[in-house]
Amino acid sequence: MPRRKAHKPADSLPFRPFAEDAGVQTFAGFSIENGTRCIALHGSLDLTRDRAGLTRARALKTLLDAVIATLEAEDLPDAVPDEPEVSEPVRNPFA
């Protein structure tokens, strides 16, 4: 029977869910942007029926398990209040 590899603990992820607004976890064209108010998922991820697909599925599961554990450990509101986007003027580099 083949040996199963140990899964990465959530503590070893490049970012802790909802801990900061700058972290991004990317694999195979799929990005998960960390934020203090929300976590955004972008791109696409193919979970192929092979070892590579299994590895990607496990990585995604580990990340989502960490997000779920973080949410379950908190007293959550029904919804996050909308905050207006704050825009800052940017100097035109071509002017």
Image: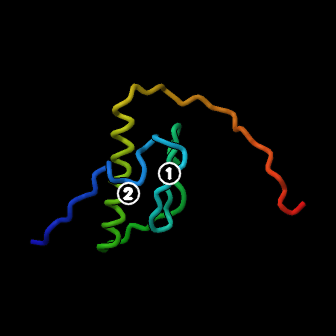
What number is the disc on residue 53? Answer: none
Q: How many marks?
A: 2
In the rendered structure, which disc, 1 or 2, sits on the residue that comes first in sequence?
A: 1
Q: Residues within 10 Å of mark 2 (few under 14, many from 20)?
A: some
Taking the spot 36% from the left edge, 41% from the top edge, the residue there is 68
Give the distance between the C-alpha atoms of the residues marked 1 and 2, in whole angstroms.
16 Å
Pick whichever, 14 or 77, lies toward us: 14
> Residue 91: x and y, percent?
82, 52
Taking the spot 37% from the left edge, 53% from the top edge, the residue there is 13
Give the residue number, with chain letter if any, for mark 1.
Answer: 23
Kind of residue at badge 2:
Leu
- Label 1 secondary element: loop
Is residue 25 placed above or below 47 in the rendered structure?
A: above
Taking the spot 33% from the left edge, 39% from the top edge, the residue there is 69
> Residue 20: x and y, percent?
50, 42
| Foreground disc of the pair 1, 2 | 1
> Residue 93: x and y, percent?
83, 60
What number is the disc on residue 60? Answer: 2
Is residue 67 placed above or below 78 in the rendered structure?
A: below
Kind of residue at badge 1:
Gly
Taking the spot 38% from the left edge, 67% from the top edge, the residue there is 47
Pick whichever, 42 or 88, lies toward us: 88
> Residue 74: x and y, percent?
38, 29
Q: Which quadrant holds the C terminus?
A: bottom right
